[in-house]
Image (cartoon, helix red, strand yellow):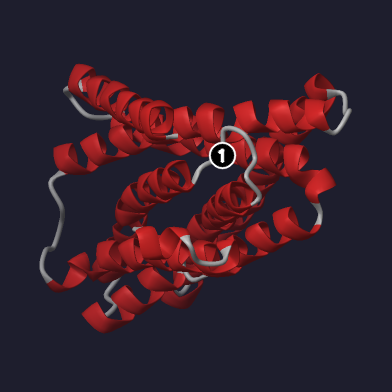
Amino acid sequence: MEYLSNLNPVIQALIATLFTYGITALGAAIVFFFKKVNKSIMDAMLGFAAGVMIAASFFSLISPALEHAQNLGQNKALICTLGFLLGGIILFIGDKIYTHLDKKKGIKTNSLKRCFLLVFSITLHNFPEGLAVGIAFGSAGLGIDGATFISACVLALGIGIQNFPEGSSVSLPLKREGFSNKKAFFYGQLSGLVEPIAGVLGALLVIKIRILLPLMLSFAAGAMIYVVIEELVPESQTNKRKDLMALSSLIGFCIMMILDIALG
């Protein structure tokens, strides 16, 4: 960890997002071992990741954004609200595009197009997630108050955890569509390749253009909260044991909060 903490923030962001991509690939690799995954385990992982991401959105993104905006003499309420809404709206638009394409595919859609739609929908979420990780490491590298190497690592861990079911959510349906294990895995891991690109981009933008840091931090927070509300919590709550899934979210939040406060 000491070696990693001394690396250039861009390299840190690249390594972290390669890790989150690797978890996506690991999730996609389930097709080689199982026909389906225990739903309760998957839902608990999603709930846990939701808690981690909610805590990270405030402690690692919104809080530093507010403080940095004040230091730059910006209107912190306006800038952070604008960035937060933009992050959510970008994903909202992406979901609308996917829904539009999904409605047009019809019952005669071939398997290649179904594959594209699955990969496209997951990729829409992965780009801002990679961006959030890059921003976190770039902010820590600049020494921004509230942004630390540890909190950036935990954020990457949280995103990595929720990437596992995302990878399997692509590969398993494709296997049911008749794809071979190798092809189902290939398309499943493909959806995560955008994260390292977004991670490096996020770190570079933060380091090169500090004045945009409050906007970018709040943007990343908005994107993450949208993913939590739109995807993670609703999916985890489809489980019969909703109470346990909610508890897993609380545990994820507490772990992220403790790490961020105690080690930050």
Q: Is residue 187 above or below residue 228?
A: below
Q: Picture coordinates of residue 8 (x, y %)?
A: 57, 66
Horizontal side, residue 264 vs residue 239: left or right = right
Q: Picture coordinates of residue 63 (x, y %)?
A: 61, 26
Q: Which residue is mark 1?
A: 147
Q: Is residue 207 above or below residue 139?
A: below
Q: Residues within 10 Å of mark 1 (few under 14, many from 20)?
A: many
Query: Which residue is at a point 48% across and 34% down the rendered structure image?
Result: 56
**Quarter assignment of residue 238:** top left
Q: How many marks?
A: 1
* Residue 147 vs residue 187, the one in the foreground: 147
Residue 170 visible, this angle? no
Residue type at the position of mark 1:
Ala
Query: Which residue is at a point 61% across and 57% down the rendered structure image?
Result: 101
Q: Picture coordinates of residue 55 (x, y %)?
A: 45, 28
Quadrant where the C terminus sits is top left
Q: Single out the residue that lies furthest toward the top.
A: 243
Give the SS element for disc 1.
loop
**Quarter assignment of residue 154:** top left
Query: Which residue is at a point 67% across and 64% down the rendered structure image?
Result: 201
Q: Is residue 188 above or below residue 179?
A: above
Quadrant where the N terminus sits is bottom left
Q: Picture coordinates of residue 126 (x, y %)?
A: 52, 56
Residue 100 visible, this angle? yes
